[in-house]
Image (cartoon, rainbow, N blue to C red):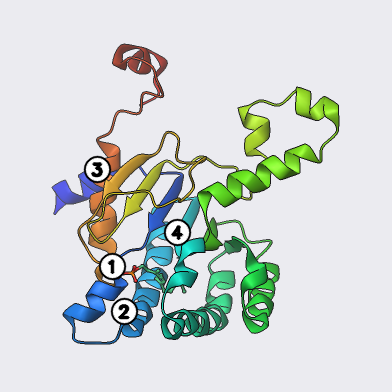
Amino acid sequence: MQEQVASLDNLKIPHHLAVIMDGNGRWAQNHGKLRVSGHQEGANAVRRIITESAKMGVKELTLFAFSSENWKRPALEVNALMTLFVKAIRQETLHLLENGICTKIIGDKNRFPLILQKQIAILEDTTKDCNVMRLNIAANYGGRWEILKAAKTLMSLPQERRDNLDEEKFSALFDIPCDVDLLIRTGGEQRISNFLLWQCAYAEIFFSKTLWPDFGKDDLLEAFTFFSGRERRFGMTSEQVRNKGLQ
Ligand code: FPP
């Protein structure tokens, strides 16, 4: 037990954690249920992971809830997801406020039903001054869409600012300017699926076989243990990293 606590003490916690929550459909199938039940159970896992991440000291958490491509799913599933988002936001807004979690939805919100847009506005406004952890929920989001959006913003800036552009200034044009330290994908697939393409340039990537609805504290600890064992070199040699004390 003592050993476990000591190793928890040595755990490195990513500043910015991003998660591709995959496997809701397969979870439902495995349990002989409709896909929508998988998403409902997935919403419980979302609550768990937000709470655990904040407790463990993550400062920014970005969750991929709905991609720009997910509109192609059967209308029944898309509608059920929209209803679930409205319900989950309604239920969780107060809890997020009480826990100091500043929450933003990133993605093109215009295509969402008005009721969802309204609920999002309430959530963002209610939690805007919270400072324990930032929570970004990516919905109707795509990494290429986001890069294109930043490029369009850039084109509208005065010539002088465009001439002085560097990576840091370009990052500042994104809804999420902060680089990702650790990206987790659940459900056994090994791809990035157009998620945070700009921000994941130097992310460590942990692929978990656990289906999202089953993902819990132990899985998170496993991912953080993996992260703690990584040497993040950012293009340098191991020796340079050690000398700079970056690890
Ligand atoms: C991917 O699993 C999951 C989604 C497309 C939806 C994610 C939604 C939730 C986790 C529910 C609630 C979220 C919030 C933020 C309240 P999949 O359906 O592609 O699974 P499969 O690969 O097994 O079919």
Tag 1 near tag 2, CB within 8 Å: yes
Task: Identify residue type, mark 3.
Answer: Phe
Task: Identify residue type, mark 4.
Answer: Ala
Q: Which residue is mark 3?
A: 226
Task: Identify residue type, mark 1.
Answer: Gly
Mark 2 or mark 3, earlier in chain: 2
Q: Rounded to the nearest whole Å, what is the CA distance between mark 1 and mark 2?
A: 8 Å
**Element carrying mark 3:** helix
Q: Which residue is mark 1?
A: 23
From the top left corner, tell me how far across and down residue 228 is, in percent: 28, 38
Foreground mark, 3 or 4, reads 3
Can the viewer see residue 57 in this picture?
A: no
At 57% across and 64% down in the image, what residue appears? 100
Pick the residue in front: 105 or 220. 105
Viewport quadrant of the C terminus: top left
**Element carrying mark 4:** helix
Asked if the residue at label 1 sits under 8 Å from ligand 1, the reply is yes
From the top left corner, tell me how far across and down residue 150 is, in percent: 67, 43
